[in-house]
Amino acid sequence: MRPIEAKAISAIRVLSADTVQKANSGHPGMPIGAAPTAYAIWSDMRHDPKDPAWFGRDRFVLSSGHASSLLYSLLHFYGYGITIEDMQNFRQFGSRTPGHPEFGHTVAVEATTGPLGQGFAMAVGMAMAEAHMAAIFNKEGFPVVDNYTYVLMGDGCMMEGVSYEAASLAGTQKLNKLIAVYDSNCITIEGSTDITFTENVAGRFTAMGWQVIDVENGEDTVSISLALEEARIETEKPSLIIVHTDIAHGTLKQGSAAAHGSPLGEDVIADMRKKLGWKNPPFDIPEDVYAHFEALSQRGVRVHNEYNAMFEAYKEAYPELAAKLAAWRNGDIPESLSSDEAMFAADAPKATRSCGGIVLNRLFAAMPNMFGGSADLAPSNNTELKGTPFFSPEQREGCNIHFGVRELAMACISNGIALYGGLRAFCATFFVFSDYIKPALRLSALMKLPVTYICTHDSIGVGEDGPTHQPIEQLAALRATPNVYVFRPADQKETAYSYLASLKLSAPSVMALSRQNLPQLADTSDKAMLGGYILRDPKGTADVILMASGSEVELIYKAADMLAVRGYTARLVSIPCMELFRSQSREYQESVLPSDIRARVSVEAGATQPWGAYVGLDGASVGLDHFGASAKASILFDKFGITAEAVAEAALTVIAANK
C-alpha cells in the first residue's frame, strides 16, 4: 500500500469517528474497521461524482446502514458535494447526513437502509434489473446496460432471515454481477457473535450457488482488490467476499461491543490519532488527501465520457431502442391507457383479483417495462404477464419473476428493481401475508418508490382457509403507514381506475383484491381516481350516508333499498382509496361527505378503526374487530354480520340518534 493510500484510509477513519463524536450519537466501529474495504471498492468502482445519477454507474448499497458515517465520508472525499459542514451536522435536524442513509435525501445514496438485511436484498433486485435490461437493450459492441452492484453488509445483515431469502434467489438466478462484501467483525451490540451466530457462512453461500472468496486480513487492500477482481470476472455466480476485520481497528476499543453503537470518546480518538500519526484537528483534512481522491474520481469521469461516446453511436445504430430506453427511464405513461376499453369492460360478476389480472396485462401491453411477479401464487393472484417468459438465467428478457415463497425478499427485491431505474416493479401475495412484506413496504414509502403491491384474497371471503389466511387488521395497518396508497376496488371499472391512479403516484400502492366474485356496478366511474365519490344520491337531502369499499359496496346498495321501504333515503359513497380521497380539496371532500349529514354508516369486512374519521362520533361502522373462522365465505359474512341487513339496522339507529 502506498503512503498516500494509507493516509486516505486514515482520513476516512478519522473523519467517520469525529463525525460520530461531534453528534454524540452513531456507530463508529464498523466505519473504522471497514475503511480499507470501502476504499478498495470505491477505488475500483465505476462512478462519476459530477453526475451521480449516470445510468451506467456501478451501484453501491450500504446494507449496514448504521455505518452511515462511512458512506458520508466517502461521498465527501470523492466530491459528491457532502461538505465538512454536512459532516459536522451528522444526525441533526434537517441535515444532509441523517442517522441512516436515505435515498432521495442525500446525493448518491442508492437506497434507504438501516433495517438490516434489506439493503442486501435490494441489491439483489438491482442486479436482477441490470440483467433484465441488458438482455433487452444491449447489442454487440454496445453494452449500454452494464454495471456491477456492490453491497457492503455486516454480521447483523447475515443474521436477518431476509438475507437468506434473497441470497437463495440470487444464487438460483446466477446473478454474476452482484458482489456482496461481508465485513465480518464478529461483534454486535450485545457482544461477540459467538453467543448467537456460529454458522458456516461460507458454506451456506456456497450451497446457495455463490462464489465465496475469503480475505483473512481486512487491512490488506491488495488482497481485497484482488478478491473484487476475481468477483468481477466470474460469469456464472454472484460473489460473496468475506473480509475479516476488527471493529474500531487500531483504537483502544478494538474488538469491543462498546465500539458498535456509541461514540468512542475524545480520549480514544486522541489515541487513535496518535497511532495513525494524524496531526490535524477534527474536521481538518490535509490537501494531499483531497488531491488523491480527486485523482481517483477522474477515472470515473473518463469512463463516463467513454460511455457517452458509445451511447451516441448506439443512438445512431439503434434509434428505436435508444428512444425506448429513454422512455423507460423517464417513466413515461402512455396516454392511450385511459381509452383502452378492454381494461374497463366486464359484463358478469368477477373477483377483483381476476379484474386485476386483466388490467395488469392491458398495462403491460402499453408499458412493456413492467417487471415483477408473485411469491409462488401467480395463478391465484392472477399476476402472470402474458406473452413474455419468466426471468431466468436462460431468459433474462422475461418480464415475469418467480420469487418463490419469499414474501419479504420479494418486496425488498422489488424496491431494488424500482431503485435501479427504468422498470415498473410489482409483486404479489395474499393480503394476509402483507404482514411479511410490511418492513419493505415501509421503505418503499420512505423512498417514495412507485412499487405496486398486489394483495389478493382481501377478507373473510377467503373462506375455508380459516383465520390464518383471513385478513382483518391489515387494511388498518397499511392505511396507517404514511405515503402508502391502499386501493380496494369494487368491480372491474374501479380496479382499472385504481391502477391508473397508482401510475401517477410517487409512492407505493397496495391493491387489495377479492377472491370471491363481485357484481359489476352501473354507477362506478373514473371518479374512483379521486379516492372517494358519490355512487348514487336521492333527490333532496339524504337521511343517511352509506359508505364502503371493495366487496362491501354491493351491500350498501341493498341496504339503501331496505331503507327506502322504511321511508328513508341514502347517499351511497364508494371509497376505494382513503389516502387519495384525503388528498383532494376540502371542498371536494365536503361535497361527498357533507358535514351537516351526521348520520353515517360504513361497512367493510375488516377492522373498523380506519372509518372513524368518516363516520364521526354520531355514525357507526359495520366491520370485523375479531379474527375469522374456517367456513364458506357466504356463511362467514352472515355469521359475522357483514350483511345488508346489518347495515340497514345500523343506519336506522344512527338516523334515530341524529334526529
Image (cartoon, rainbow, N blue to C red):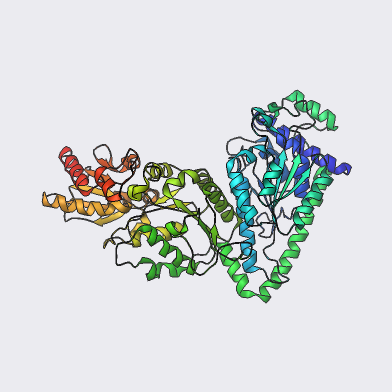
- Which corner quadrant of the image does residue 5 belong to? top right
Q: Nearest the camera: 78 or 379?
A: 379
Q: Residue 450's spot in the image, x, y percent?
A: 50, 54
Judged from this view, the residue extending furthest toward the right is 2
Residue at horizontal 86 percent and vertical 43 percent from the top: 4
Visible in this render: residue 130?
yes
Q: Residue 347: x and y, percent? A: 29, 67
Q: Quadrant of the N terminus?
A: top right
In the rendered structure, the answer to whether residue 480 lies left or right of residue 648 reads: right
Residue 368 vs 653, above or below: the answer is below
Q: Is residue 112 visible?
A: no
Q: Nearer the viewer, residue 194 or 233?
A: 194
> Could you tell whether 495 is left or right of 287 in the image?
left
**Residue at (20% x, 50% y) in the render:** 559
Quadrant where the C terminus sits is top left
The residue nearer to you, when weighing 10 against 284, is: 10
